[in-house]
Image (spheres, rainbow, N blue to C red):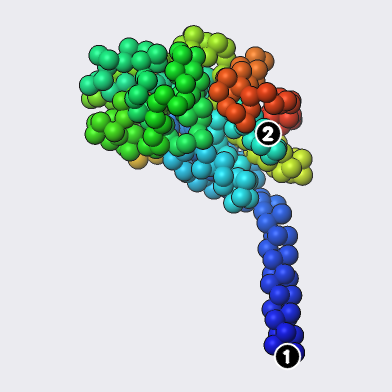
Amino acid sequence: MRHTFRKLRQIALCASVLSVGLAQHAYAGDDGKLSIMVGGATKIIYLPAKLTEQLGYFKDEGLDVEILSQPAGVDAENELLAGAVQAVVGFYDHTIDLQSKGKQVKAIVVFGQVPGEAEVVATKAADSIKSMADVKGKTLGVTGLGSSTSFLTQYLAERNGVHADQFTMLPVGADASFIAAIRQGRIDTGMTTEPTISALEKAGDAKVLVDMRTLAGTKAALGGTYPAASLYVQSAWADTHKAQAAKLAHAFVKTMQFIHTHSAEEVAAKMPTDYQKDRTLYVNALRASMPMFTADGKMPADGPQTVLKVLSAFSPSVKGKHIDLTKTYTDEFVEAK
C-alpha cells in the first residue's frame, strides 16, 4: 500500500512538472526572446536572416533573436513543429506540404520569388547527362529527404518523364559536404544554392543543368514564379503573438529594402567573414542572386498556385488533397504599420 502511494505521488509530481513545462513552452518567446532556425545559414538564399541580425534591425524592434542553423530545411521544420524554435527561415513549399498532413504553418515574410537553386551535374557525368530526362538510374544529391531540394528534384525529373522510383536521391547536405559528394563521385547530379554553385563551377567540378536562380530560368523550369525562401511560423503562434510577428516582419522588410538599395559589395561587407571563404566568389554570387529577393517581403500573386502545382505533380501527401492556400501565407504582418 505504501509502495502504491509512493508511486502515485511520483506520478502526480511528474504530471505537475510536465504541466509547468507545457505552460512555459506555450509562452516561449513571450519575453521578447525568439529562436529562428535557418535551413543553412550560409546559403545566399537565406542571407536575410543573418543580415537582419548584423544590421541590428531585430534590436531596433525590441526583439532578442537567436539565429540557429540546420543543414536542411526539413530539419528546421521539425524543430518548429517540436516547439524548439518560434520561426523558420526555409522554403514556402513546406507550408503546403505540412497542411496536407494536418499541420497549420504559414509564411509571414517572403524573401525569394525564385528558388535561387540549380541542379548541377558533375563534370565527369556531363557527357551522359544533358538534361533531367537523362537521370534514370543515377544518384541525385539533395540537402535532405523531405527537403525543398528533394521536392524540386522529384518535380523536375517527373516533368521530364523520369519517375521517382527510377533514380536515387541521396541526402548530402550543403556547402562543403555537397562539394565533397560531387568530387567523390557519390552523386551524379544534385541541387544546391549559392555560393556552392559558383564554387563548383570555378573549380571545374560541375556544370549547371537546370538554373532556377533567375525569374526567367525558374519560369522555364517550373512554369511560373516560385516563392521560396521565407519566414514561416506555426499559425497558432502567429494568431497569439501578433505584436511579435509584426516586429519580426518589420525587421525583415527593412532588410529587404537594404538589399535593394545597396550593392553586392556593401551587403557582403555586413555579413560575417566566415560566410565568405572566397570573398570575390561570394560577392559575384551575391551580385547574381540579388534580383531573386523581394523588395517588400510580400507573397508574389501567382506564387502559391505554382508551388501547389509542383507539389501536386509528385507528392502523394499533396496530390488530390484540398489545400487552402490562403492559410499557407499572410501579408498581414509585412503590411502592419
Residue 245 vertical position relative to residue 133 in the rendered view, above or below: below
Mark nearest the camera among 2 and 1 is: 1
Instruction: Return the residue nearer the eye: 300 or 274.
Output: 300
Quarter of the image where one finds residue 106: top right
Residue 274 vertical position relative to residue 31 in the rendered view, above or below: above
For disc 1, the marked residue is: 2
**Residue 201 location in percent, x, y?**
28, 21
With 273 as the anchor, is 270 left or right in this view? right
Residue 218 vertical position relative to residue 80 in the rendered view, above or below: above
Q: CA distance from mark 2 to mark 1?
A: 49 Å
Furthest-bottom residue in this view: 2
Say which label, 2 or 1, has the lower sequence index. 1
Instruction: Return the residue nearer the eye: 226 or 60.
Output: 226
Furthest-front residue in this view: 165
Residue 89 vertical position relative to residue 260 in the rendered view, above or below: below
What is the number of callouts on the image? Answer: 2
What amino acid is labelled 2 in the image? Gln
Instruction: Return the residue nearer the eye: 271 or 78.
Output: 78
At horizontal 74% and vertical 42% (from top left) the residue drawn is 236
Quarter of the image where one finds residue 256: top right
**Residue 171 location in percent, x, y?**
40, 37
For disc 2, the marked residue is: 99
**Residue 44 location in percent, x, y?**
44, 29
Quadrant where the image shows the C terminus: top right
What amino acid is labelled 1 in the image? Arg
At horizontal 66% and vertical 51% (from top left) the residue drawn is 29
With 204 as the anchor, is 34 left or right in this view? right
